[in-house]
Image (spheres, grey):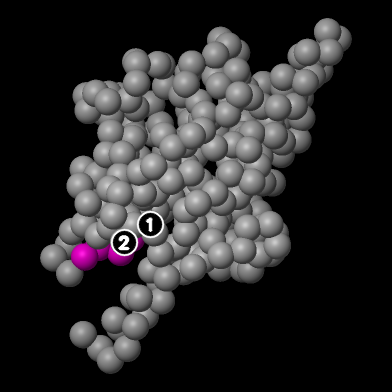
């Protein structure tokens, strides 16, 4: 191994831990967490023996308590490899995440939420409608998966992955939302916009007036504009001012997340 490689690997893991801890804190700050039972996972570089490794929150900690150093390293089955906090993980809760990570190697981060707005939209036949700029972002980009009960059945993983396909956003019907990101930052930004879309839909339809959906043409055009912006960051490597701004917000609202 070339000189400096271990240090580079450590730096990568340090940055990933910081970003994942930030994701937990941001989701909590937005009121989008759900007790101790939902998860955000991130893929680590493979271990020396090719072992698949992922970061997950320690079981029992609220999202607003997660720090970079408390994150647990698990394998693809959710078995603990390294546990700095000492509380283990909710392995059953990693079922969905492990399936996505193992099938989609582009999914560096998988974020699952059960918000009131997200669950509400997941509970109607129409799902998310192209009613505004936020929801237009997801036009043609949404996958749907039917509810099969609490996600403990390993057999469900194949069906979930088949439904997800190559898309990065999935509505788990009667359950919640799932987003995949090429980075932690992308997963968080997609999730925040998805949540706003759901809230806006509930607000618009709740007024009792006539909804005015965007045309397929305009919605598709808007989705492509959003995608181009994300690709500039994730593919071209341009700076991500939105993620930087979110991290600055945490420095004020939740300092210590990166400890």
Tell me, for residue 46, which label it has, or none: none
Height in image: 14 above or below 141? below
Q: Which of 129 and 195 lies nearest the eye of the viewer?
A: 195
Pointers 1 and 2 in contact (C-beta within 8 Å): yes
Tell me, for residue 84, which label it has, or none: 2
Q: Where is residue 225 in the image (x, y as percent from the top left)?
A: 69, 46
Say which quarter of the image contains residue 118: top right
**Is 78 left or right of 186, judged from the image as shown?**
left
- Main SS category, magenta section: loop
Which residue corresponds to mark 1?
Answer: 71
Tell me if residue 46 is in the magenta stretch. Answer: yes
Could you say whether the residue bearing mark 2 is in a helix, strand or loop? loop
Q: Where is residue 156 in the image (x, y as percent from the top left)?
A: 27, 24
Residue drawn at 47 percent across, 59 percent down: 67
What is the magenta range? Answer: 43-47
**Is 7 left or right of 68, judged from the image as shown?**
left
Q: Position of residue 8 (x, y in %)?
A: 37, 80
Residue drawn at 45 percent across, 62 percent down: 68
The nearer-to-camera label among 1 and 2 is 2
Q: Closer to the N terminus: mark 1 or mark 2?
A: 1
Residue drawn at 63 percent across, 58 percent down: 254
Say which quarter of the image contains residue 77: top left
Q: How many marks?
A: 2
Tell me if residue 161 is in the magenta stretch. Answer: no
**CA separation in Å, label 1 and label 2:** 7 Å
Viewport quadrant of the N terminus: bottom left
Residue drawn at 55 percent across, 21 percent down: 119
């Amino acid at each position: 191994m070339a000189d400096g490689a271990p240090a580079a690997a450590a730096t990568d893991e340090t940055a990933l831990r910081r970003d994942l801890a930030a994701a937990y804190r941001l989701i909590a700050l937005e009121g989008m967490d759900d007790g101790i039972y939902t998860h955000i996972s991130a893929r680590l570089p493979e271990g020396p023996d090719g072992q698949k490794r992922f970061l997950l929150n320690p079981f029992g900690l609220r999202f607003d308590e997660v720090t970079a150093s408390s994150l647990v390293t698990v394998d693809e089955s959710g078995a603990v490899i390294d546990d700095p906090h000492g509380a283990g993980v909710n392995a059953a809760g990693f079922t969905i995440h492990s399936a996505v990570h193992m099938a989609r190697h582009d999914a560096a981060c998988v974020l699952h939420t059960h918000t009131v707005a997200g669950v509400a939209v997941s509970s109607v036949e129409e799902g998310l409608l192209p009613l505004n700029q936020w929801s237009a972002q997801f036009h043609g980009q949404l996958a749907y998966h039917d509810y099969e009960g609490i996600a403990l059945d390993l057999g469900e993983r194949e069906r979930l992955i088949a439904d997800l396909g190559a898309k990065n956003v999935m509505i788990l019907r009667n359950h919640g939302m799932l987003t995949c990101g090429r980075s932690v930052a992308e997963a968080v930004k997609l999730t925040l916009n998805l949540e706003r879309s759901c809230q806006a839909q509930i607000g618009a339809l709740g007024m009792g007036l006539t909804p005015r959906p965007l045309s397929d043409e305009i919605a598709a055009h808007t989705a492509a504009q959003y995608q181009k912006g994300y690709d500039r960051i994730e593919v071209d490597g341009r700076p991500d001012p939105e993620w930087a701004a979110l991290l600055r917000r945490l420095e004020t609202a939740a300092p210590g997340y990166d400890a």
